[in-house]
Each structure stands twice: as structure tokens, then as C-alpha cells.
Image (cartoon, rainbow, N blue to C red):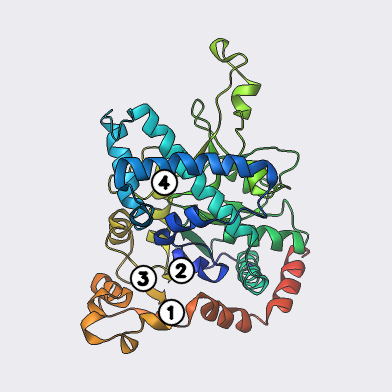
Amino acid sequence: MPPCSSKTVYVLGAGFSADAKFPLQRDVLGQIMDLELSDFPLNHINDYLELQKQVMTFLRVAIDHSEAISRSRSLEEIFTLLDQCISDDANFGGLSSNKLKGVRESFIRLILFLLYRSAEQIPPPAREQYDKIAAYLILKRLQAGKQGDPFSIISLNWDTLLEDSIIREIRRIKAERKIDIDFCFYTTPLNRKKSIHTPSPKQKAKGIYNIKLLKLHGSSNWLRCPVSNGVFTGMGMPGSCYDLYVPPVASPLITKLPSSNEQGNPPTLEPLIITPTFIKEFELPHIQNTWHNAFVELRECTEVVFLGYSMPEADYHFRTLLRRALRPETKVSVVLTENDNLQQIPRKFRWTSATTRYASFFGEDVDFHYNRVSGYFSHCIKSAGGSSEIRKKCKASLHK
């Protein structure tokens, strides 16, 4: 089948993961305080409590003195404060910039704990819903042929909800090493023998159907070596996320190929997520490359579909990318909830709605859908014959 002449870019916001009960940014701090640890992996409870104590002590002593007030603080406010002090090599709340770096790292690891927890507690109906979406996307990619480029996905989320569903579907149709997620930069498996992931630059050469997923703010399943700058992922590997990403992991590359001053002392891999801050920086080459590729994908597409993204004013980096990349003739579709429909919002509050922000940004030529992400894809899945038929078509396409 020849490559598709049309191309869709799906943009995933926090609302994409809403049915899976992943926390919104405004809820993260409260959930970190209240997280129930009774069914946590026993070997990680102490790790979590130690991280929580360090962050909560900083918030109460350095900022509020009150848990109730601390709970109301936004992540942007906290990370902006930490980043500014670290950047200026300044003390704050009796802590040196070096100690503040430790607080910041602990906060990031708490957020990852929360995301891993959410990933393990997805309601079964929601999990099946996202698996069906993954199956639909896999079929769309297969039908375009190995050289095809029918769609790409740009995610502003840290969670791995979609890639986990894609991996499950790949295994369901027995397509390991035939289909893979393409992060559009070099990601190395933490363990090559146990992983089904092939680094992105090698996928086309190996005849693998690549599904492009560009994560502009990093990902909870990426770990970066601070010496080699290599990025490692445990995607598709057996075991829990807690075991893969929480314990300190020595850099595999530096362990394998140390220099004379690194003998016996390889660096520990660091989580690679871009935190919410008003002095957000994108200096790492992996993130810069991801943003560049996102520009190319948006420039090439004939339709962009925003899924659960509210177009906040604070996302000025992404809004600028859209302004630069999208062509006037590109079709714009926006998938929101019924609560975002202006007909459901009192007139005096309409100026604050996501619908108004989109209309202001793109003009009147926007195709709005208020049936949620599940409703939007339900129509796509039904048009393709239903989930069972989609999986049969996937298997048939692989064995042509």
C-alpha cells in the first residue's frame, strides 16, 4: 500500500489520561501527601517516606509552616522557586543551592512514584479503552506500509499510558520487534535481552513499523546518564516501574566503557522529565531534538487533533511552536468534554474556557468535539470494524 498523502498529528494533553485516573498537575501535591501506602511494594515504602519527608519539610519550613497552605501551592510556583535559587547558586530557607538540588530531585521522584502508582491502578474498563485506541493506531500505521507516515503523536504528558497500551497490543498480536514506538531520538533499552524496544534510528533499517511518539516534556520511563547524556528506557521490560526506575541504577554505558577516572564509580541515571516552571529550559539535546521533530511533524500534517488539551496560556513554548509550524490550510480538530461546550457555561465565565482559548488562537475555523477522548476514538474504532476486527486486520497485515 503506498504511503498516505494525508497525515494527522495527535496532540495529547492531561485530559487524554483522565479516564485512567492519572492526576492533574493541580492535584499532584495533595496526592503526594495523602498517598495510601498499604499496598505499595514493601521494599519501596521506606524510599517513598524518606523522599516525602524531605519535600514536606522544605515546604513547611521554607514556604508555609502549614500543611493546608502547602497543599494549595502549584507545582509551577515550587519548581520555579527551586530552579531560580539553584540557577543563582542562592540559599533559601536555610538550605544551600546544593541541598535545594536534592529537594528538587526528591520531588521529581515523588511525582514518578505517583505516576507509577496510577499506572498500576487503572480501572479495567479504562485500560481496555486505551488498548482499543492503541490497536486502532497500530492498524492505521500498518495499513500505510513500512515507508508510510500516516500520523504521529505529540504528548505533553509524563505518563506512559499510551505506550503501555501499544506494547500490550503488540504482544497481543504477536508483533514484537515488528512494530515499535519511535521516540524520534536514540533511546537505549536498560536491558537489551529483556526489552522488545529497538532504538529509534535503527527501526526503519530493521524493517520495523515505527509509531512516532514525541514527548515534549520528557517521560516517566526515561533515565538519563549525566556523563554520556545517553537516555535509557525500561519500556516493554518485565517487572514493575518501581523496580525499573526507583532504585539507583548505574549508567550501563559508563559501567561497560569507563574512563580511567570513572573506574568503579559509574554515575547514577537521572529521571528525564521537564518540570513545570516559569523558567522552563530545554537545553538537553534529546528534548531539543524532540521539539525540532515536533515542528517538522506539525509542518507536514494535514490535520492536527488536540485530545484533552486545554491550550493554557502558560504553555507559551508550545503555543509558539504551533504558531510557527502549522500551515493555514491545516485542519484543526479539538476534543474536549461537554463541560467545555460554551452552551454549558454561564456567559460571564466563557472567556476562561478552553473553547474560547482555541477560538482566540486559531480563529473560527476549528472543528470542536465535546464527546471526550473515549467518544472521539469510539467512532474511529467503530468505523474500522470494532476492536476485534481491528486486531484481526493487524494480524493479517503483518502476515501479508
Q: CA distance from mark 2 to mark 1?
A: 9 Å
Distance in Å between CA atoms under marks 2 and 3: 23 Å
Give the label on residue 330, or none: 3
Q: CA distance from mark 1 to mark 4?
A: 27 Å
Mark 2 and mark 1 in contact? Answer it, CB < 8 Å. Answer: yes
Q: Amino acid at mark 1?
A: Thr
Mark 2 / mark 3, whichever is N-terminal: 2
Relative placement, left or right, of 384 versus 368 is right
Q: Residue at x 60, y 33 (%)?
A: 248
Give whichever of 32, 214 is nearer the camera: 32
Q: Residue tagged by mark 2? A: 15
Amino acid at the residue labelled 3:
Thr
Badge 3 element: loop
> In the rendered image, which residue does mark 4 sit on?
274
Query: What's the CA distance linking mark 3 and mark 1?
Result: 23 Å
The nearer-to-camera label among 3 and 4 is 4
Which of labels 2 and 3 is toward the front?
2
Q: Amino acid at mark 4?
A: Ile
Residue at (76% x, 69% y) in the render: 396
Give SS at disc 2: helix
Q: Relative to 122, does residue 352 appear above or below in the rendering? A: below
